Amino acid sequence: MKNSPIIALDFASAGDAYKFLTPFEQSLFVKVGMELYLQEGPSIVYKLKEMGHDVFLDLKLHDIPHTVGQAMRGLARLGADLVNVHAAGGAAMMIAAREGLEAGTPTGSTRPSIIAVTQLTSTSEAQMQQEQLIPTTIDASVVHYAELAKTATLDGVVCSVLEAKKIADACGQEFLRVTPGIRLAEGEAHDQIRVATPANARILGSSHIVVGRAITNAENPVQAYETILKMWEENA
Ligand code: C5P
């Protein structure tokens, strides 16, 4: 799995995604989320893999263990490099997810890595406390979910940059910390609440960053990607 910034292909159709990708000359690490996957289905993953890209299939599964296990068994055949579930689904669900992936990975292929979403980067501490009735700090909730994911033998978590270091300390450097909420300037948060720049993400302990609108909405997406890649690599 590559370590370059993961570009979120948050587009409504495969046509829009391919149009966006055309000016890029190198092979990329791209993320297909529910917006694109629910329109295009498995073919979008096959095609992106054929084009030579690494694929994070960000479907954030969250259901009873059997259902998630069976869904992962099917997803394992698509060839994605990274998939995810919500840690809030619980340890049994995460274990079923990983077992499903293992069962579904074709012989001779590598099992996709699997990570758990902790608290969404669009969630504030006040929201978590008032809406989810979790009476602790966001840090404590995120680190707790990360430890639960590690116990359930997952490969890492999705978290905000602000929690990445604590998770590395608690779960080890090998445990993936994939962080969305990346912005070139702190002022452009959109709906994200816990945001950071690519340089800060690296310094604060992200293992991978996910970048959507800072690249896809840029006037020159290739240039925006190169700038972000440079900031990310320079701080390694
Ligand atoms: O445009 P932006 O950079 O905010 O996009 C972030 C991407 O990361 C979106 O595709 C979003 O679904 C995803 N994501 C997130 N927070 C998580 C998990 C995934 O923002 N916890």
Image: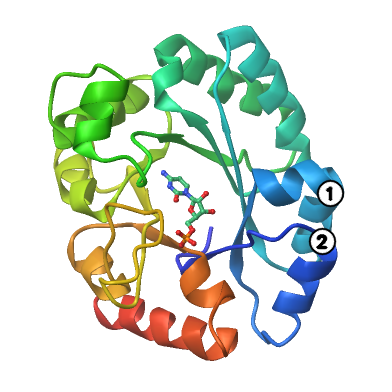
Residue at (29%, 26%) from the top-left corner?
A: 145
Q: In this view, does 8 lie to the left or right of 196?
A: right
Near mark 1 (Cα within 10 A), the count class, few <14, some 14-19 or many ≥20, is: some
- Against 70, residue 234 (above or below) is below
x, y percent for residue 89: 46, 17
x, y percent for residue 53: 68, 66
What amino acid does circle 1 point to?
Glu
Front position in the image: 108 or 21 = 21
Residue at (65%, 75%) from the top-left corner?
A: 27
The C terminus, quarter of image: bottom left
Name which quarter of the figure residue 20 lies in. bottom right
Residue at (29%, 31%) from the top-left corner?
A: 146
Q: In this view, does 62 lie to the left or right of 174?
A: right
Front position in the image: 2 or 35 = 35
Q: How many numbered discs, if any?
A: 2
Residue underneath mark 1: 40
Front position in the image: 114 or 102 = 114
Q: Which colour assignment does the render follow?
A: rainbow
x, y percent for residue 165: 17, 50
Viewer can see residue 176: yes
The tag on residue 63 is: none
The tag on residue 14 is: 2
Residue at (53%, 57%) from the top-left corner?
A: 1
x, y percent for residue 46: 82, 53
Name which quarter of the figure residue 219 lies in. bottom right
Is there a contact, CB below 8 Å, between mark 2 and mark 1?
yes
- Against 118, residue 196 (above or below) is below
Helix, strand or loop status at disc 1: helix
The answer to which of marks 2 and 1 sits earlier in the sequence is: 2
Helix, strand or loop status at disc 2: helix
Spatial CA distance of label 2 from label 1 is 7 Å
What amino acid does circle 2 point to?
Ala
